[in-house]
Amino acid sequence: MKKTLLLMMSLSLALFVSCRHDSETMADRFVEDLLQKMTLEEKIGQLNQLSGDYRQTGPNRVSADKIAEIEKGALGSVLNVFGAETTRKLQEHALKSRLGIPLVFAQDVIHGFRTTFPIPLAEAASWDLEVIERSARIAGEEAAAAGIHWTFAPMVDVTRDPRWGRVMEGAGEDPYLGSQIARARVRGFQGAGVGAVDAVAACAKHFAAYGAAQAGRDYHTTDMSERTLREIYFPPFQAAVDAGAATFMSAFNELNGVPATGNRFLLRTVLRDEWNYGGVVVSDWGAIRELVPHGYAADDRDAAFKAILAGCDIDMESNCYNRFLAELVRQGEVPEALVDEAVRRVLRLKYDLGLFEDPFRFCDTVREQTVLADASHRLAAREVAERSVVLLDNKSGVLPLDAGARRIALIGPLAKSERDMKGAWSIQWDDRELVSLYEGLTERVPVGTEIRYARGCGIDSSDRSGFAEAVAAARASDVVVMAVGEAFDMSGEARSRTDIGLPGVQEELIKAVWATGKPIVVVLMCGRPMTIEWTAEHVGAILCTWWLGSEAGNAIARVLYGDYNPSGKLPMTFPRSVGQIPLYYSLKNTGRPAPDDHAISYGSAYIDSPNAPRYAFGHGLSYTTFDYSELQLSTDRMSVDGRMVVSCTVTNSGSRDGEEVVQLYVRDLVGSVTRPV
Ligand code: NOJ
């Protein structure tokens, strides 16, 4: 019996392997045949990617000259165009080209499409891989229903500098957590695999070290040892490769003197040779052209030459390949084989997406309407939002709110905001579908509760004329909820800040309200770790809610009332001051490890600040308490590639249900190379 079973299993395995092998050969053969038919210009067309004229003329416009390019086969993919109907029309133009090669439609689907999920940094605070995967799954499903084949996500850049605006797009400071999340997001976007009609191809970006921009200034230089690159910045990219990410995007920044988009070490030695990666590499927007201002290429022609040689397959919005690549090949400077290699990868992506079989398979308007109206997506968005909230402080015990408190003052410039709840990089077109904190709270408060709203001040203004109204509202209430933080466009691409404190006069507003002596909860809505020293020291209850997306207000109201007991943990350190940056948990010990206040004794410390952050990576409280006991190791020795199981008993010792993320930190105490704490 056993033998038969084994035999059957090996037979089916053999069949599977041979089927897989057959389909691989079929795909390769198809691509090869097509490639043979293509002129050099048609090949280069596949490497050319342009945007719809989204910004200038409203969504989904594509100018007549671009349509002409499409019909000539001079454009292989388009970004910033979506909708089943619009993409169908453009695809029809593509089919008019000599070989009728379909277009690929790409879009930055970063944290949701129609349904906006929390910003990626917020989701990372859930430390919940299933939830993160589900969010990407729904985003992928909605995007695919709207004609999109390819998302430029996930961003897997490790980052340790909260001044950098793009921290909101990633998973924070840690390569291990970042790698787990990279896998979950790739799995979520790609669903059953590239080609599934309810999924999109993922893109691991920005390769590499973009998150290490000097001084946190976007697009700035990065310079680091190869060890740091491999140990800290590469792992999430490797994880994305392991998870089957269909594509990669090269970064804007230079790395150790060579811009990433022209960096052979990154794009060939590491990605192709070491990691054996076979997917498409797309440049970031205009990044090939930017090799010129970097001082790495003499002109656009030289930029095209350097980028293709380095291994960048698709030119996004630089117009360098379509202007110079044919000439470079004809003059013998670029071997045509190199172009073929890149084109093969692009055609293979189109093949895997099933577009040669049916170019319109993502253009179903009925499916689009059904999927985008799916009410379960809103529910999922609320659940993900709840799990993304981090309870930073509750020393006053004000949270959860007492249902008996019948007079609530809701104060602050973000209390009624809807747009800011979306955060940066959002696509959802109808702001009315966003729930503000005011709306969420109004829905949730017990019957008979009165909410007194006062804006107090603007997010980034110096006008204090609303303070008096805010103070009066606080005085007339039992408890005060203050919604403060950043506007959606203070974080994200090109949104670096040198001061990461509360903008404008918001801290002054908190001080004025605090002076009333009323119990206060600060709800911090932000796209990065912030410095909130005064608030942290004086206000007894602080919830970090980031930007939570479509269901923000409902999720926050439920957390405020304890319907959901917060379990989020910081994926990135909150420093006390900008002067401590870069500050992250896995620092080196130094030869002079110092207790915080011992700088004067020549320890590694400051004379004007503790070393410790305000809130460390991994920090996050709950409305209940957990005790850890019976810590056990399965062995007291472990080889380099060995395995050790660490277990413990976690007891909920409080009076409410709750969830806990158990974290384990390890350090090699002595080594031929020092290891981080
Ligand atoms: C520039 C950004 O850096 C990148 O992340 C994005 O995918 C492209 N623009 C396309 O919008």
Image (cartoon, rainbow, N blue to C red):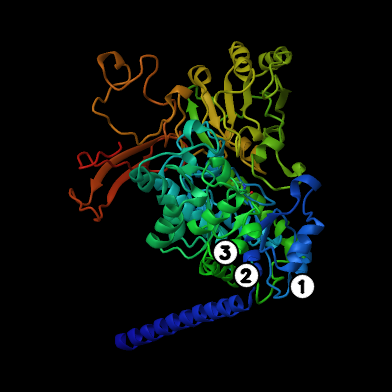
Q: Percent from the top left, x then y, of residue 342?
A: 54, 65
Beta carbon at label 3 within 8 Å of ligand 1 = no
Q: Give the CA separation, mark 2 to mark 1.
A: 18 Å
The answer to whether one can see residue 366 in this image is: no
- Vertical position of residue 415 compared to residue 60: above or below: above
First-in-chain label (3 vs 1): 1
* Amino acid at circle 3: Gln
The answer to whether one can see residue 359 in this image is: yes
Q: Residue at x 35, y 42 (%)?
A: 225
In front: label 2 or label 1: 2
* Crowd band around label 1 with a 10 angstrom C-alpha radius: few (<14), some (14–19), many (20+): some
Residue at the disc numbered 3: 331
Residue at the disc numbered 1: 96
Q: Nearer the viewer, residue 106 or 316?
A: 316
* Amino acid at circle 2: Leu
Q: Mark 1 and mark 2 in contact (Cβ < 8 Å)? A: no
Q: Percent from the top left, x then y, of residue 282?
A: 57, 56
Q: Percent from the top left, x then y, of residue 553?
A: 66, 37
Q: Is residue 306 left or right of residue 637?
A: right
Q: Residue furthest front?
A: 331
Residue at the disc numbered 2: 40
* Amino acid at circle 1: Lys
Q: Give the CA separation, mark 3 to mark 2.
A: 13 Å
Q: Mark 2 and mark 3 in contact (Cβ < 8 Å)? A: no
Q: Nearer the viewer, residue 34 or 616?
A: 34
Q: Nearer the viewer, residue 367 or 303?
A: 303
- Give residue 472's quadrant in the image: top right
First-in-chain label (3 vs 2): 2
